[in-house]
Image (spheres, rainbow, N blue to C red):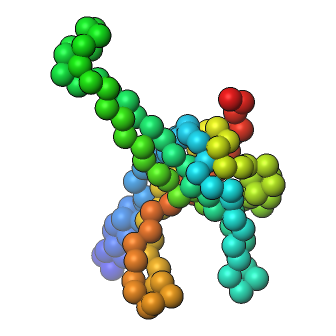
C-alpha cells in the first residue's frame, strides 16, 4: 500500500511538471531608425541593438471602398536586440539607418536600473532572423 501511494505521488509530480505549449513570435517589417550599436557588459553577452519603425495607415470617415475620408497613420518604434553570434555581427556591420528590413523573433519584457538609480521597464524584440530588403 505504501508503494502504491508513492507511485501515485510520483505520477502526480511528473504530470505537474509537463509544460503547456505556447508561442511567443513576432514578425516586423519596417525601417531602421538608427545605426546599430554593439553593447557588452563585463565582457559577456555582446548584443547589437537598433530601433525599427513600423507604420499603420487607415482611412477614417467614409467607407473603405469609397475614396472619401481622411487617412490616418501611426508609427510604432521597436527596440531590436540581436544576440546570435553570426547574426549579431552581420547586423552590426550591414544594417544602417533607413534600411528596410524584416525581423523575426520574440518579445521580451524586462526591467533595468538607469544611471540615476531609477527602475525602468523595457520591452525588446529578441531577433532570431534579420532579412535585408531592397528599397
Quadrant in which residue 64 is drawn:
top left
Residue at 59% x, 42% y: name it. Answer: 31
- Please determine whether, in this image, residue 95 is positioned above or below residue 113: above
Point out residue 50 in the picture as x, y percentages from the top left corner.
Answer: 62, 58
Is the residue 21 above or below the residue 117 in the image? above
- Give above or below for 60 relative to 81: above
Extreme left residue here?
61
Report the number of numbered marks.
0
Residue 54 horizontal/vertical position (percent):
48, 41
Q: Determine whether, in the image, residue 1 is placed left or right of residue 125.
A: left
Name the foreground residue: 68 vs 123: 68
Pick whichever, 4 or 69, lies toward us: 69
In the picture, which quadrant includes the C terminus? top right
Q: Quadrant of residue 68?
A: top left
Residue depicted at 64% across the width and 38% down the height: 100
Q: Which residue appears farthest toward the top when viewing the image?
A: 66
Residue 120 visible, this orientation: yes
Q: Between 1 and 81, which is closer to the camera in this rendering?
A: 81
In the rendered view of the protein, which quadrant contains the N terminus? bottom left
Can residue 105 be seen by looking at this rendering? no
Q: In the rendering, at what x and y percent does residue 22 appear?
A: 42, 49
Q: Quick check: 122 left or right of 94?
A: left
Figure check: 104 above or below 135: below
Write the residue at 42% across / 47% down: 76
In the rendering, at what x and y percent does residue 32 appear? 61, 47
Q: Residue at x 45, y 90 (%)?
A: 116
Amino acid at each position: 500500500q505504501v508503494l502504491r501511494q508513492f507511485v501515485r505521488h510520483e505520477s502526480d509530480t511528473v504530470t505537474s511538471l509537463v509544460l503547456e505549449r505556447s508561442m511567443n513570435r513576432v514578425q516586423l517589417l519596417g525601417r531602421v531608425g538608427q545605426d546599430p550599436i554593439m553593447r557588452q557588459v563585463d565582457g559577456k553577452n555582446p548584443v547589437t541593438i537598433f530601433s525599427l519603425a513600423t507604420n499603420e495607415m487607415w482611412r477614417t470617415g467614409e467607407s473603405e471602398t469609397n475614396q472619401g475620408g481622411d487617412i490616418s497613420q501611426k508609427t510604432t518604434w521597436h527596440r531590436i536586440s540581436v544576440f546570435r553570434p553570426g547574426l549579431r555581427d552581420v547586423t552590426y556591420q550591414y544594417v544602417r539607418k533607413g534600411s528596410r528590413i524584416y525581423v523575426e523573433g520574440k518579445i521580451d519584457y524586462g526591467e533595468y536600473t538607469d544611471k540615476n538609480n531609477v527602475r525602468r521597464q523595457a520591452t525588446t524584440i529578441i531577433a532570431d532572423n534579420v532579412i535585408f530588403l531592397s528599397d
